Amino acid sequence: MGDVIMSSPAFRALKETYRCRITLLTSGAGSVIAPYLECIDDVIVADLPWVKTNGGNAAALLSLAEEIRKRNFDAGIVFTVYSQSSLPAAMLLFMAGVPVRAAYARENPYDLINRWAPDHEPYDTIRHQVRRDLDLVASLGAHADNERLELKMKEQDEESLLKKLNQRDIDLHSPYIILHPGVSEVKREYPAERWIAAGKLLAQEYKLPLLVTGSATESELAGRIAEGIGMNALSIAGMLTIGEFIWLVNGARCVVSVNTGTIHIAAAIQTPTVVLYAQTNPQHTPWQSPHEILSFSIPEKLKSRNTIIGYVNQKLYTTDIPFPQPQQILSAVAKLIEK
């Protein structure tokens, strides 16, 4: 989801430049944010074997290529992070007969990618992911007047959010702080006991409700943290749709989160954010929004086996950084709230 949000300024550049219809091909996880991006007209959801999902199979891949062929697309653009190969997706587009295929690649892809952008990251430079995607579409002549992240907010989502929170005696019109501890990868975790300690400091300092958020699968963690904090803390993990969550983030005084899709939602609606940032992807920080970053190292045993990520680790992350102290989180929140 976060990757799709970060690519959205590039989608917008294509839409504004070419007045085209845009179909997003993404995973089930990425698709949930598509209804909140005005530049997306349609979505194809597929779990692909080269993406971290349930994989799919050869028959499904051939069926997907045929579906793409039937839609007669004029062009296909592959968005990747620098540690991913664009060639599998480019092969899918080639099989589907898409005439223009644009992507980054390190090696010469010849006819597989006929709008080739040589990939110099991360060896010569490292760009923010949003800039990387914008530069790719710029090589095709597409530019956006506004390069910020944006999400469409729907009134019905606000109404349903208010109803749900009223049932829990939460007043959405009063100030509150969001704590978002859940991660998709263990290596990004910030320990629960430190969340509890930081939450207690925030509750004592600001006397505001602390809403602990997350998916249904993260409800046990969120509940444990809220219970540990005690004062004014409440878990609402698993309660909200993505549209309702966007409204919740929109109304928060501040969001404290690990580096996950939540920080990009907050960036899109300009909610101040403190990011507990595991040193995995240096190019995925909040884009053009108020934020404070508190970095920490990931354990050696959890580091990626991807050799490109290994290169970045050796180049950028040579100093071991411990988990941020709860007092540091309080100080970072204070910087954002008091601006």
Image (cartoon, helix red, strand yellow):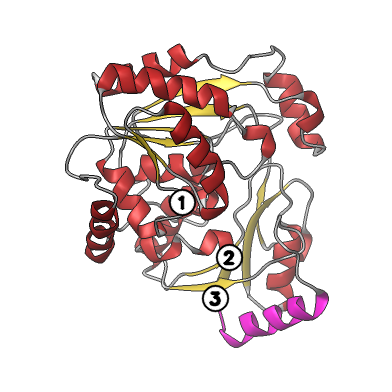
Q: Residue 293 appears at what percent x and percent y?
A: 47, 23
Ranked by sequence position, the earlier of labels 2 and 1 is 1
Disc 2 residue type (three-letter): Gly
Residue 152, percent from left and from top: 30, 58
Q: Residue at x 58, y 41 (%)?
A: 183
- Residue range in magenta is 58-74
Residues at marks 2 and 1, CA–CA distance in whole angstroms: 14 Å
Badge nearest the viewer, 2 or 1: 2
Q: In this rendering, would 104 be left or right of 18?
A: right
Instruction: Tell me if residue 59 is in the magenta stretch.
Output: yes
> Badge 2, how many Cα within 10 Å: few under 14, some, many 20+?
some
Query: Residue 40's spot in the image, x, y percent?
Result: 42, 67
Residue linked to disc 1: 5
Residue sitting at the far bottom: 70
Q: Which residue is mark 2?
A: 28
State which mark lies toward you, 1 or 3: 1
Which residue is disc 3 drawn over? 74
Do the CB atoms of the residues marked 2 and 1 lie less than 8 Å apart?
Answer: no
Marks 2 and 3, Cα distance to the nearest angstrom?
24 Å
Disc 2 + disc 3, Cβ < 8 Å: no
The local secondary structure at tag 2 comes to helix
Residue at position x 69%, y 25% from top? 298
Nearer to us: label 2 or label 3: 2
As for residue 223 lying within the magenta part, the answer is: no
Is 12 situated above or below 62? above
* Chief secondary structure of the magenta portion: helix
